[in-house]
Amino acid sequence: MSATPAALEASASTERQAGGEGAVPLLRVEGLDMHFPPKRRGDSPLIAVDQVSFTLGDGETLSVVGESGSGKTTIGRCVARLYRPSAGRIVYRAEQGEVDLATLERDALRPIRRQIQMLFQDPNASLNARMRVGDIVVEPLEIHGVGTRAERLERARALLERVGLGAEAINRYPHQLSGGQRQRVGIARALSIEPRLLICDEPVSALDVSVQAQVLNLLRDLQQEYGMSYLFVSHDLGVVDYISDRVLVLYLGAVMELSSRDELFDAPAHPYTRALLDAMPARIDGRHRKRSVLPGEIAGPSSRRGGCPFAGRCPHAIERCRSEVPALRPWSRAPAKLVACHRADELDLGSAVPIPRAAPPPSQPNDAPA
Amino acid sequence: MSAPLLEVTGLTTHYRLPQGTLRAVEDVSFRIEAGETLGVVGESGCGKSVTARSVMQLLPPRIGRIVAGSIVFDGAEEPVDIASLDPNGAPMRAIRGGGIGMIFQEPMTSLNPVYTIGEQIVEAIRCHGDLSKKEALARAVELLGQVGITEPASRVRQYPHAFSGGMRQRAMIAMALSAGPKLLIADEPTTAVDVTVEAQILELIDELKRERGMSVMLITHDLNVIGESADRVVVMYLGRVVETTTARRVFDAPAHPYTRGLLGSLPAIGRRERLRPIQGSVPGPHERPPGCPFAPRCSEAMEICRRQPPTFRIDAETSVACWLHEEAGGQ
């Protein structure tokens, strides 16, 4: 495997992406804005997503993390075009060529929708309670007119088998299933149409721990088999560490840091990333470390943008942070990583958690970053 | 050893539902010593919340009922068996919010949106003491300050909607502490909040516990919360206690296959090896298997597991309801 030199675009650095389809990512989001109308007339609109840019490669998992109100779910919904973005481009490399999902009209969007599916947090709310499992699973095929009914049902059986439910689940109703089983139905439905991109919005947050692990393993296996890309929205950094290739850290709608998974945990560049990692529970040398507590809470989405959105809670903030919005730019110590912090180059935030690595990464001297 | 603050023995709580009787909690026993935090951990349907509600006699009227066992609370002049008290009687009301305070997962369901935070805390204070309204208000301000709410004197006049999620949880804690309880029951206090706020709330509970010498019963689905905040832990599955041990051992030497399964399922920063989930899923409330409740999902199940195992005591710290530990000896 030959690593390309770290390019300015953060898309370059993952192992899965090197080679294959070449340099054109599956998804390229540029300057995405999502504004919602204010609750009261006369107020300015709420900025849920603010100038967000990232890329997603083939077979890659990019996680979007942040606290509630950070805009992570909204980004997923914009890419799925459940929302029409206020500004920006969502360039998707369709089989027919590149298209900008942000501006595509309904009819043009239809064929693309086949390739992008969504998995929701709450399988109770997202599955139609009146439909049998088999019909739920094949509905996307039906909508897009794929196959005969017999063929579709055959596919449903195969998919239900694959997601670990067993073909006999085809005639059951959602209420006869447990939460984990319903999420498997959601996965089978999303897979039925063989998407290239699966947007997972907190897909395991509502599940019991033992079942959550089953679903995470299933998602990992299916990605290997089908070569799908995942845009994985989550608040749980433990889950994110397990499933991601790269991670985008959001705060109040803006990107704070965009990093490979390992570099995020080993060398956080943004004070907010560091604070999030410090607030995570972690067991070190046989005991849980004391979490350090970030004072304050994330504010709701606001309309005001006068500086770094994190400045008010940041222990390292200086005057400039309150007056000037920091640009997202490559980090001097690891240029494949992007960070939006005026002080990123001078601060040493260390490694958040001494992470026990099962095996050291294969080091090849000539692959070392310049 | 002195008598524990709370000793629950053979607690069995049933819910009468249209589909039949649900054995929500079966033969549950544990003790909470003065000044310690007991964690109660388990997945949905394990009975951890019903156990807490039984201790508070806050079961849904006409549906939930304690059918057996005792709940001896030794926080007043003399020990009293809560299980024998009338849920609506004066002695139980004195314990509820007096000797034992409780906070819930979603503070909004316990705070009344049409009263100010101050009015609600004042009411709680005056229920359990003979302070004047003015004195109670001063006490409310003091309590809000103690739980880390800034500018408590003005915050006390605000309504719950003006508080953030973390502040509401703090206000709930202030209310639960208003009568100076000996035991604080915290039912999933951090499940609905962000991880940064979770760290704040857990630290606050820990601080208050130390300052006041309180005991805490911490109910959670999250083993990490146990590892951080609890001294000892009770692991529950389908209404039964499967293991009682220390918070340290639950990670270092889990004894019950279910506890081991929970640990194998837990993603954590730095954990890259494949997760080892428990097979299957928690059965529905009306599909309790006979014998050991975990047997159908247990990779080590044996013939004998069709019979409910007794609790085997491994040593002073750990006991486990699993036939694998039969050699450890009797009860």
Image (spheres, helix red, strand yellow):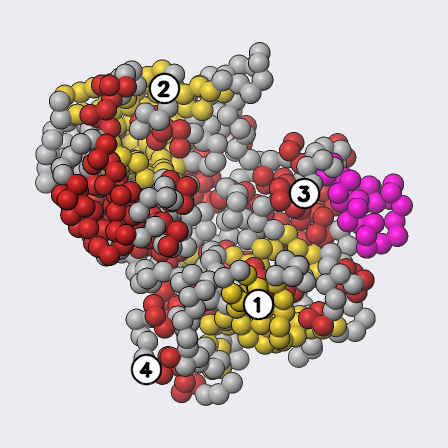
Whether pointer 4 and pointer 2 mark residues with C-beta atoms closer than 8 Å, the reply is: no
Q: CA distance from mark 3 to mark 2?
A: 37 Å
Specify the amino acid type for callout 4: Glu
Going by the image, does B179 lie left or right of A164?
A: right
Kindly report the distance in space between the C-alpha atoms of the residues bearing marks 4 and 2: 60 Å
Q: In front of the other: label 3 or label 4? A: 4
Upstream in sequence: badge 3 or badge 1? 1
Amino acid type, mark 1: His
> Label 3 vs label 4: CA separation?
50 Å
> What amino acid is found at the position of numbered circle 2 in the picture?
Pro
Up-down relation of residue B76 to residue A350 (above or below): below
Write down the chain letter for disc 3.
Answer: B
Q: Nearer the viewer, residue A206 or B306?
A: B306
Q: What is the number of the mark on residue B14?
A: 1
Mark 4 sits on what residue? Answer: B303
What residue do we see at 82% from left, 41% from top? Answer: B137
Label 4 packing within 10 angstroms: few (<14), some (14-19), many (20+): few
Quadrant in the picture for residue B56: bottom right
Mark 1 vs mark 4: give the one in front.
1
Q: Which residues are magenta?
A: B116-140
Q: CA distance from mark 1 to mark 2?
A: 52 Å
Name the one closer to the observer, A82 or A329: A82
- The answer to whether the residues at label 3 and label 2 have Cβ atoms under 8 Å apart is no
Under tag 1, what secondary structure?
Answer: strand
Task: Please report contact status of discs 3 and 1: CB closer than 8 Å, yes or no.
Answer: no
Q: Label 3 sits on what residue type?
A: Leu
| Mark 3 or 1: the one toward you | 1
In the image, is residue B119 part of the stretch drawn in magenta? yes
